[in-house]
Image (tube, rainbow, N blue to C red):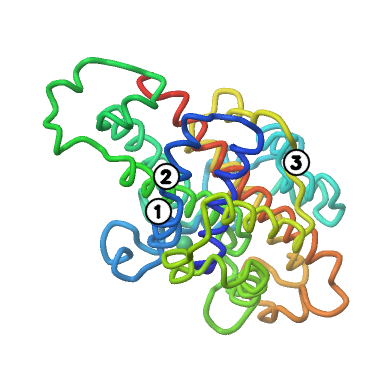
Amino acid sequence: MDQQTHSWIAIRAIALLEQNNDMPALVSLLKPHARKASVGAWIPDDIYVKNGGCRTDCHVLKMTVYSGGQKERFVTLKADLMKQAGPSRRMAGFLQEDATLGADWWAIPFKGDASPGQHLPNRVMALATMLKDLLLMGDEQVYDLIPHKNDYMESIDAEARTREEAAALYFFMLSHFAADSCMPCHCDARKLSSYSGGGVHHKLEKHWSGSVGNGFERATLLKTAATDDQIFQQARDVDAKFGLQFEAGPLPDLGKDHDEWLEDMFICRASFAMASVIAPYKDYPYDNTGPIAKYDALLGNGQAALLQKVDQAVLHDAVWNTAIYWKHIWNTIGD
Ligand SMILES: [Zn+2]
């Protein structure tokens, strides 16, 4: 996703917690720093950061047919994915409604084609675990906000403690990977999903950022005279451009017995299944022997209804999952 889409998703996630009066202490940590921390929402895509520990492989979990000896392990039946992703996720709703992926498709074993330690669920897990430690070692302002108190903080040099600004930046970085997991092309190993070549991946991201608009561009957010509340209102106003609706009330926790890694693994599987609906696997097989699909053929004229469903499922869940991960981290500090 483009810079402004990532910044919007993270700011919209804070606004979602705020409007639901969910996690007020977390909102009060993030909201005043949202503008500057918005850099964190897209910096993982910066080449400078990618040359560090945040390589391209960490932004994807590209699934393909598995032909090894543990086939059962890599099958997730539709009913199980619906349960694991939970009813609040629009991606699950999209797949529940879909009739193009039959029982034969759901019985195929699929596995992410990733280098060890380098894929989206690992990145989400790593940031979530580190954030809990960094928050426990927060400075006085952070310490006043976190729900778990301890006294070993006394032994950490005041200069070494985590400032609110730094914590906000890392929360925003986590939103980047939460959002990338929801992008179907990030979870599909077929050539048609690659970013280069002007295909569906690139054009779909441009479609989103065009609608999110310039208000969430880096330069605008850093120099705007708008108040935090005005920026949050702008973030909520974007909902109407995609027809997004967020449920009121407290957000759910991770699925039963899930940690962040497993939660994200199921989200990536849902994302891959969506890619297989957008580009039907019978026309565009996983062995790449079919034609390269173009955006116009899959989501262009005549496909407006499908495009709107994709927009709503991906963008709703990118915001929703970000807020769920943040809430879970905050509630499990010190566990
Ligand atoms: Zn990315």
Q: Alpha carbon of mark 2 to alpha carbon of mark 1: how far?
A: 8 Å
> Cβ–Cβ below 8 Å for labels 2 and 1?
yes
Q: Which mark is residue 171?
A: 2
Tell me the crowding category of disc 1: few under 14, some 14 to 19, or many 20 or more residues within 10 angstroms, Cα based: many
Q: Which mark is residue 78?
A: 3
Q: Nearer the viewer, mark 3 or mark 2?
A: 2
Q: Secondary structure at mark 3?
A: helix
Q: Alpha carbon of mark 3 to alpha carbon of mark 2: how far?
A: 31 Å
Q: Is residue 51 visible?
A: yes
Of 306 and 151, the residue lying toward us: 151
**Which residue bears the numbered disc 1?**
37
> Cβ–Cβ below 8 Å for labels 1 and 3?
no
The response on whether ligand 1 sits within 8 Å of label 1 is no
Name the kind of residue labelled 3 in the image.
Lys
The response on whether ligand 1 sits within 8 Å of label 3 is no
If the image is split into quadrants, where does the C terminus sit? Answer: top left
Q: Which mark is residue 251?
A: none
Label 2 or label 1, whichever comes before in sequence order: 1
> Cβ–Cβ below 8 Å for labels 3 and 2?
no
Q: Is residue 303 above or below residue 140?
A: below
Percent of width and height locating residue 323: 56, 40
If the image is split into quadrants, where does the N terminus sit? Answer: bottom right
Q: Alpha carbon of mark 1 to alpha carbon of mark 3: how far?
A: 38 Å
Percent of width and height locating residue 129: 36, 34
